[in-house]
Image (spheres, rainbow, N blue to C red):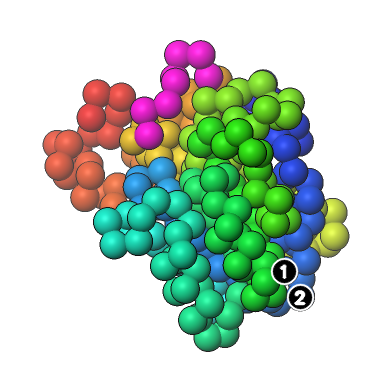
Amino acid sequence: MRDLPPIGKLPDIDAAAQRVVRAILQGETVGLLLDHDADGVTAGAVLWTVMTENFGFPAGKLHAVLSHRIQEGYGVSDKLVDRILALDPMPSLVITADQGSCDQPRIERLRAAGIETIVSDHHLVPDEGVPTDALACINPARGDSAFEDRTIAGCMVAWCLMVAVGRLLAEAGHPVRGSMQTALQFVGLGTLADCVDLGASRMNRFAVQTALARMRTSDLPIWRAFAAKSRGQIDSAS
């Protein structure tokens, strides 16, 4: 990990991490807004798993809301916002996974309802810029991003956010259990599924290599089922 680009150069990651830490320490209700594809789902798995297992955040205070592209449209749609506003209890903070950079009007609706939004995404930012009503927009594709790797997938952006949160929690004396690298098994899967660049990106190769190694020894049912379908082997060929 020491050879990877410093995650602190991702735009807005410090402000986002500080806000997530506050939500954890104060026991707020948090919503996770997940894109429907494999990148969005694995990004959501990273956020959920790290929040609950590594940081000890109660699962009952987390809402995972998956978008439906056919019924609701792309990104953070109005129908998705309607579902968020109908949650009981309603979250005070939402974190997007693999979406949100183009969704200023819907994020404005969330803010008007008293919900702060952290965008974690990797898609191109529109000409008008990042959502101005978002508390933070962590996106390596931003024009003002100093992060050297613009090819990472949304699941890697989510993982970087959780790493930054974990560092702040540790500094605050809050227990952080286990290794953050465990969640890379989801990052590797999302990275492969989203067909991002492996040749030029150290971060993408690191995610996939780490994921394959962890999949081979993991007890998670998903990987055991995958191994059975792959005749017992989980490697670069399978």
Tell me which residue sits at (58%, 25%) in the image. Answer: 150
The percent coordinates of residue 157 (x first, y second) are 58, 41
Viewer-nearest residue: 183 or 14: 14
Q: Quadrant of residue 61?
A: bottom right
Give the vertical position of 229 relative to 6 (above or below): below
Q: Secondary structure at mark 2?
A: helix
Tell me which residue sits at (65%, 32%) in the image. Answer: 142
Viewer-nearest residue: 213 or 207: 207
Give the vertical position of 168 relative to 212 (above or below): below
Give the residue number, with chain letter if any, for mark 1.
Answer: 23
Tell me which residue sits at (58%, 80%) in the image. Answer: 90
- Crowding at mark 2 (Cα within 10 Å: few <14, some 14-19, many 20+): few
Kindly check if marks 2 and 1 are in contact, taking CB atoms under 8 A apart as contact: yes
Viewer-nearest residue: 196 or 60: 196
Q: Is residue 224 left or right of residue 157?
A: left
Q: Secondary structure at mark 1?
A: helix
On residue 26, the disc is 2
The percent coordinates of residue 215 (x first, y second) are 36, 41
Location of the C terminus by quadrant is: top left
The majority secondary structure of the magenta stretch comes to loop
The percent coordinates of residue 234 (x first, y second) are 28, 34
Q: Is residue 148 left or right of residue 181?
A: right
- Crowding at mark 1 (Cα within 10 Å: few <14, some 14-19, many 20+): some
User: What's the magenta region?
Assistant: 194-201
Tell me if residue 59 can be seen: no
Tell me which residue sits at (49%, 81%) in the image. Answer: 86
Q: Amino acid at mark 1?
A: Ala
Q: Amino acid at mark 2?
A: Gln
Q: CA distance from mark 2 to mark 1?
A: 5 Å
